[in-house]
Image: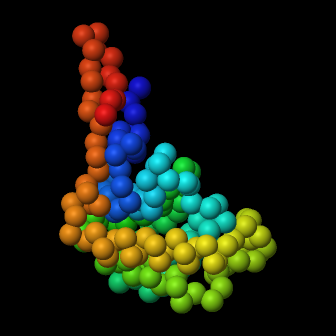
Amino acid sequence: MDLIPSFSVDHTAIVPGIFVSRVDNVGNSVITTYDIRLTRPNREPAIDAAAMHSLEHIIATFLRNDCDWKDEIIYWGPMGCLTGFYLILKGNRSSQEIYDIVVKAFESVKDTKSVPGNTPVNCGNYLMHNLGMAKWYAAKFADYLTENAGKAEIFEYPKTERIVTDEGQQFYDS
């Protein structure tokens, strides 16, 4: 069984950044999944679940209302490991091409007064939000992206190497 693309990334070497996770052809359309990684997996603590939930609500609202590509947004949501988010867009843009939108999305959090959709009617866990921590994580990530904008490592996945045994069994190793 092949590993899915996100498991073929060397999680011991990845740094926070914006990465193309996969590109899919769906009918006559191209769909691109981006890995928006806020922390270093297995080296930094996972993002606080309540803050992650708040970031999901705030940034999804920004992307679907204030983003230049709002009609191209398919999905914004957290990774199960709580180290970042997935952004799925129509089309095939490089990580560098979506850089400005990602920075703007995280910078938009600082002016947020309340978490959108934070009611029992609109949210499946409306009590699990932390706007203060969401603002802290968002500012930290936006500053990091700005400080490291010229570095290739925030745009290029550290891939693992696929090892194939003489019997044809495939493994991933870093």
Instruction: Give coordinates of residue 63: x percent, y percent.
Output: 45, 78
Instruction: Give coordinates of residue 21: x percent, y percent.
Output: 34, 52
- Dividing the picture into quadrants, the one containing residue 150 is bottom left
Say left or right for 64 vs 8: right
Is residue 85 in view? yes
Residue under the image location 64 percent in, 77 percent down: 131
Instruction: Give coordinates of residue 77: x percent, y percent.
Output: 52, 62
In the foreground, 42 or 121: 42
Q: How many marks?
A: 0
Model colouring: rainbow
Residue under the image location 48 percent in, 65 percent down: 75
Is residue 72 in view? no
- Dividing the picture into quadrants, the one containing residue 7 is top left
Question: Is 120 located above or below residue 43 in the figure?
Answer: below
Find the residue positioned furthest to the top.
Answer: 167
- Of the 4 image quadrants, the one containing the C terminus is top left
Question: Is 173 located above or below residue 78 in the figure?
Answer: above
Residue under the image location 30 percent in, 74 percent down: 147
